[in-house]
Image (cartoon, grey):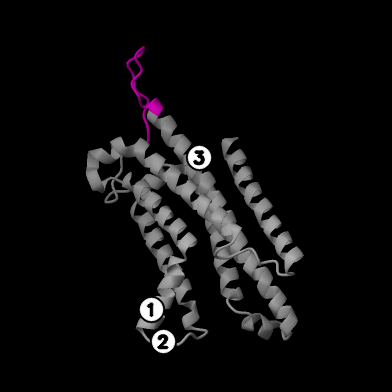
Amino acid sequence: MKLTRAVIIALAANLVLIGFAVCLGLFKTGNPSRYFGEGRFTTAFSCAQLLAVAWFSLKIFVVRRPVASTLGFLSCAWVWAAMGAGFIFLAADDAFQIHEQLDGIIHKLLHAKQTAVTDRLDDAIVGIYGVIGLAVLWLFRGELLVFKQMWRVFGGGFLCLFASVACDAISNGDQFLIWVTGNVAMGKKLDGWFSVGDGGFTLLAEGLFVAAFYLSSLAATKWSIDATPRAATNTTIAHPPTVSPLNPS
């Protein structure tokens, strides 16, 4: 029940925001993607969601810290601290356009002109973020697999993220869509809607990540309470195993 409720709330909140942004853009400018992208109110909401994920991740680490203390930095419990720091960085990147600024700095250092190919450099930087994230998840998979309630929601978030990447690739400039449709007006119109897909699927992915980490924090807290010795019976209820990245199975 908690799983269903958390997912519904996360999706509903983001769908309402996406719908409002699209309607406002169409009403004011005729462009559905007007209020998606850097510096818009959808970006502020995106940052808030990323910080919420970071909060729940760090909360799980605090609960799991006794496990981390037994193995030091070899403990998989440290993945929660790493992910918390990572999501804080992603929120800062979203707010201050860090990867876009890196794109400009690299162009200046290499004395490179902006072209259709080099314009994708900021996308490559985001791709590097993703590779680093996946490497961390794989290294610490033993700890993460303990939180089974997280993975279905997390998987849905990654599907939305992949859809966002696909929309971003298509809408990076309207030349491709103009070429496909053979019509300038239609190409520009579709470009706006694919930009909505880019921003909208990103928000949905973040919302599902919030739900996944929230549910995991509830589970971690419950396991921690259940593992506390009971005075009446002097028994301890087992909680998730201590695992090491060197032996995740």
Q: Earlier in the sequence, mark 2 or mark 3?
A: 2
**Which stretch did the figure color magenta?**
225-241
**Which residue is label 3 attached to?**
215
Q: Is residue 241 left or right of residue 198?
A: left
Please say if the residues under marks 2 and 1 sit with CB atoms less than 8 Å apart: yes
Question: In percent of the image, x 40 and y 59: which residue is there?
Answer: 133
Work out whether 49 lies above or below 64: below
**Which residue is label 1 attached to?**
106
Q: Which is in the foreground here, disc 1 or disc 3?
A: 1
Q: What separation in Å lies between label 2 and label 3 (alpha carbons)?
A: 46 Å
Could you tell me residue 51's position as x and y percent? 47, 49
Q: Element type at marker 2? A: loop
Could you tell me residue 36's position as x and y percent? 61, 64
Work out whether 49 lies above or below 66: below
Evaluate whether residue 241 shows in this view: no
| Badge 2 amino acid | Ala
Q: Is residue 70 left or right of residue 155?
A: left
